[in-house]
Image (cartoon, rainbow, N blue to C red):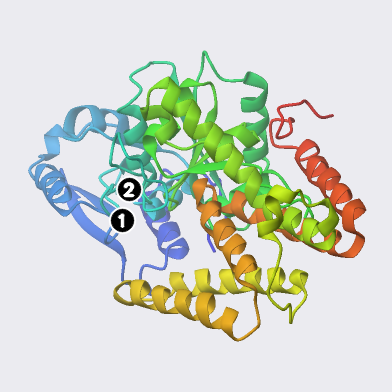
């Protein structure tokens, strides 16, 4: 753990080096490097992290420093930067907290004898993968790039799309130990000022040891959700084009270092079920896709509970729909069939996530055949129940938000149980509870999913 220390740098070069050696485990950690050189006849020390430094850039900088003569040395660090540093990203630090934070983040710290300030050279590079299109949030048309775990790359992907001087990207940090970088991005002449001020104030006042799970830890700390309301408070995206479109709509985008997705607010239920294809198709097609996705999303919640309700009250079933009634012998009550299949589908999903790619397709086919064919023949499940649960399982993927998918699943389970226990009254009570979950799901903006202001 690195303790925050606002101690000012000393005018004594030896005291500064001694203090840095006490704070940084130079002798114990192989990747924390101390490099002693002579610049213009003065003793100088570099501190940096091996693996974060661009070797070629650092080599050229040191080469230029070694060619400096005694008579060319300025009197202070500011003059040294202006006259002798052949690099663009340079800053001056006057306290140890700023120096240590920079060193552990990647930039190199340079102490020169006779200077009371430290020179920060930001010649870092982070290990990063390519900006490929994310697997979860694909688009049939449009760009094929996606966010990565390096925050500077992510801000550049959005800046490339919005060449507006009003686009602001403020850098903040959270976590006493992790010192995780957080970028708050917005367009100053379009953003909701009240929401922006509220968000920045919350980030500044965070009292956290670290952000263990990066973006998720930040989201949980920013807005403590009610444990019984599963609906997400934020929208996430791994696509820079979607994030840029949200910025242009006046929303705030929050990026967290080491996280390949952006957190977007404010949000509503319609924002949650929106996806990238809605921006790339003509108006008629986009509206059709949104309406279809909305209908299917609603169907995933009410389809199986309604079927259970009608099977418990066959006299309500219209003659035209008599063919949907269960004809086979029911060995297990319908409610238990639905609940068992809900758990089984999640089991298959978790197994698929941990299955090697080369085996995922054949194992999925085998699992589908075994569950679909043999479970019906063995008498555990009815074919109708299998069909409707298969529709629900596939329909869950029509909207891209993973967290929303599970929130809808919990609503469906609640409806199934209430309908099985209390018949029509249970179904009505479940519908009222779902509406309450949506209406009273207060987000960071102070509004609910229906965009109604809550006190």
Identified at 7% across, 43% down, the residue is 67
| Circle 1 residue | 48
Q: Position of residue 303 (x, y in %)?
A: 68, 52
Query: Which sits earlier in the primary sequence, circle 1 or circle 2?
Result: 1
Image-based side of 433 in relation to 249, left or right: right
Q: Which mark is residue 107?
A: 2
Residue 245 picture quarter = top left
For mark 2, give the secondary structure: loop
Q: Position of 385 compared to 151: left or right?
A: right
Kindly identify the residue that appears in the image at 70 percent across and 73 percent down.
337
The residue that appears at 75% across and 74% down in the rendered structure is 336
Q: Secondary structure at mark 1?
A: strand
**In which quadrant of the rendered image does the N terminus lie?**
bottom right
In the depicted structure, whether residue 357 falls above or below residue 71: below
Instruction: Name, please, the residue furthest toward the top.
Output: 189
Residue 296 in view: yes
Residue 166, image x, y percentages: 44, 16
Confirm or deny contact between disc 1 and disc 2 (CB under 8 A): yes
- As drawn, the residue found furthest toward the bottom would be 378
For this view, does 191 lie left or right of residue 67? right
Q: Nearer the viewer, residue 446 or 424?
A: 424
Residue 176 in the image, given as x and y percentages of width and height: 59, 54
| Residue at left offset 20%, top offset 51% | 54
Measured as percent of width and height from the top left, residue 377 is found at 57, 83
Viewer-proximal residue among 212 and 72: 212
């Amino acid at each position: 753990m690195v303790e925050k220390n606002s101690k000012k740098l000393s005018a004594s070069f030896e005291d500064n080096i001694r203090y840095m050696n006490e704070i940084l485990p130079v002798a114990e950690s192989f990747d924390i490097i101390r490099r002693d050189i002579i610049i213009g006849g003065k003793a100088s020390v570099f501190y940096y992290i091996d693996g974060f430094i661009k070797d070629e850039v650092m080599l050229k900088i040191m080469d230029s420093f070694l060619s400096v003569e005694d008579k060319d040395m300025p009197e202070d660090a500011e003059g040294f930067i202006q006259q002798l540093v052949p690099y663009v990203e340079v800053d001056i630090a006057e306290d140890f907290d700023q120096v240590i934070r920079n060193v552990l983040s990647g930039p190199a710290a340079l102490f020169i004898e006779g200077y009371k300030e430290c020179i920060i050279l930001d010649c870092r590079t982070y290990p990063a993968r390519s900006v490929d299109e994310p697997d979860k949030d694909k688009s049939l048309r449009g760009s094929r790039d996606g966010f990565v775990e390096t925050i500077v790359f992510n801000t550049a992907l959005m800046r490339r799309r919005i060449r507006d001087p009003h686009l602001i990207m403020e850098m903040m940090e959270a976590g006493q130990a992790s010192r995780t970088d957080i970028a708050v991005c917005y367009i100053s002449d379009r953003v909701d000022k009240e929401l922006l001020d509220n968000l920045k104030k919350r980030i500044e006042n965070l009292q956290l040891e670290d952000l263990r799970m990066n973006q998720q830890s930040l989201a949980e700390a920013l807005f403590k959700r009610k444990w019984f309301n599963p609906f997400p408070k934020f929208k996430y995206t791994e696509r820079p084009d979607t994030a840029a479109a949200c910025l242009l709509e006046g929303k705030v985008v929050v990026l967290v270092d080491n996280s390949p997705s952006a957190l977007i607010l404010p949000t509503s239920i319609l924002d949650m079920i929106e996806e990238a294809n809605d921006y790339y198709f003509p108006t008629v097609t986009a509206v059709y896709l949104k309406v279809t996705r909305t209908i299917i999303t609603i169907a995933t919640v009410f389809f199986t509970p309604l079927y259970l309700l009608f099977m418990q009250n066959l006299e309500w079933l219209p003659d035209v729909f008599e063919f949907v009634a269960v004809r086979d012998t029911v060995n297990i009550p319908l409610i238990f069939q639905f609940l068992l299949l809900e758990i089984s589908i999640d089991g298959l999903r978790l197994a698929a996530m941990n299955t090697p790619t080369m085996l995922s397709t054949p194992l999925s086919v085998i699992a589908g055949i075994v569950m679909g064919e043999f479970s019906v023949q063995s008498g555990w499940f009815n074919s109708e129940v299998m069909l409707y649960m298969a529709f629900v399982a596939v329909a869950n993927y029509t909207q891209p938000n993973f967290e929303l998918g599970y929130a809808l699943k919990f609503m469906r389970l609640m409806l199934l149980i209430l309908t099985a226990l209390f018949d029509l009254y249970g179904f009505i009570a479940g519908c009222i509870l779902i509406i309450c979950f949506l209406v009273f799901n207060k987000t960071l903006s102070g509004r609910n999913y229906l965009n109604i202001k809550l006190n």
